Amino acid sequence: MGLQTVVLSSAIMLSLVMMVLLSCLPIGLCSYNDEDGQQSHSSPPPFETTSHLKNESVTARRHLASCSNVVTVTDYGAKGDGKSDDTKAFERAWKKACSIKNGVLEVPRNKKFLLGPITFSGPCKSSFTMKIYGTILASADRSDYKKDLRHWIIFDSISNFHVHGGGTFDGNGEIWWKNSCKIDKSKPCKHAPTAVTFYECKNLQVDTLVFKNAQQMTVSFQKCVGVWGSSLVIDSPGWSPNTDGIHITSSQNVQLSKCSIKTGDDCISIESGSRYIKASDIVCGPGHGISIGSLGDHSSVGRVSDVLVNRAKLTGTTNGVRIKTWQGGSGYARKIRFEDIVMVNVTNPIIIDQNYCDQDEPCKHQSKAVQVENVVYSNIKGTSASEKAVSIECSKKLPCRGLVLEDIDLKMNDGDEAEGRCENARVYFKGRVSPKCRN
């Protein structure tokens, strides 16, 4: 074989390889802006002469950006100055990113984006990531919430969704707290927005984010399946009303870990329809503790099961680990385990309250009740701010059953022995338990 034949064969082979490689690139499918600013879906125009190099390089950069799966909100008009309303820009950016395979929506660092109420809707084309590096700030103008007074940000019907980045959701809640009837008794009681709601999401991961100054509830997982929440910081003043930290309702397979929560209500609240919930390495306080419920309000059916809370530390909270149900309800709270928990200056460290009544007028006595059963408290130690460290008050008509207190060591802040009280409950003691309570 001659040299020319070898060279020719090599050139042909190289050309074929290049054609295959080029055919794999999505250039023909990408969009770019032509000279008239109109969007085109053909390949970008070729470089013509050296004199056009600068203009064509700009075109090339735009083309490459349009081929990327990363969408930045500032490219869609968001200012990030903390004053301009960036709601529409976020809507446009979300729509674009959600339509891209493996789309990524970025919120840049060192900027503050002012948003009114907004819903980020799915389903998206495929798995989706939102990287929040900067701050998303809620509008403090209450008139912006006329259409929906209950929500600020909603993530609706999104699957395989990951939200992270170390940025901040700031609910700007002080204007709402000051107008709450719980703060100012002269004002009528009105709803306030939940800061961030995840609704009907599946395979959801939320991590390394800060949520502060929520208008009311902070983060709500509602009708979600498969949730992983970790390294979340939730920070609202202890006096802020109804600012639950993480609220779980009608959701399954939820895992929370390494979360620090300061709030004016429950650090974590787990409500009806929720099961297979695990919360580990939680730091809580100030706040109202970690709660199952409330369940059974307005004669409703409440069901919570298969809950594990372990390796938690609560400091200065008004309750520790709590189960709360209303009279007149039905359903159950069962297969619940609280273990390896440290209490520091906590009022009511262990509490079951089946006569819960969160309203101005007294609740009337009713015989129906939610069944509380198979609840274990294990290795719970620390100090109580109240004389009664264990308070179990169950339904007279439907007593609690299968309660276990194991390795409990709770004393008052001054070192004196605390007391325990159990009513209408069958309690089993294992290991050293102090204080014990009579059945």
Image (cartoon, rainbow, N blue to C red):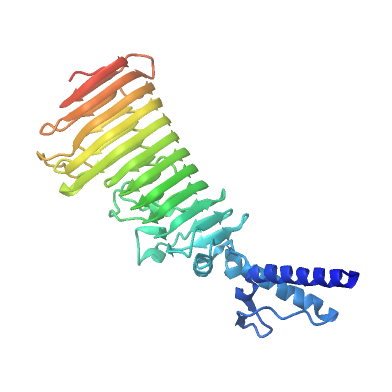
Query: Foreground residue, 15 or 331?
Result: 15
Q: Quadrant of the C terminus?
A: top left
Which picture quadrant has residue 380?
top left
Query: Foreground residue, 107 or 39?
Result: 39
Position above or below: 83 against 283: below
Q: Is residue 134 found left or right of 5 in the rendered image?
A: left
Q: Locate residue 182, reporting x and y percent.
A: 31, 46
Q: Is residue 378 found left or right of 128 in the rendered image?
A: left
Image point 39% across, 16% down: which residue? 414
Residue farthest bottom in this picture: 36
Q: Locate residue 72, reporting x and y percent.
A: 59, 63
Q: Locate residue 348, reporting x and y percent.
A: 31, 28
Residue farthest right in this picture: 3
Query: Foreground residue, 105 or 382?
Result: 105
Query: Can residue 7 be seen here?
Result: yes
Query: Foreground residue, 125 or 303?
Result: 125
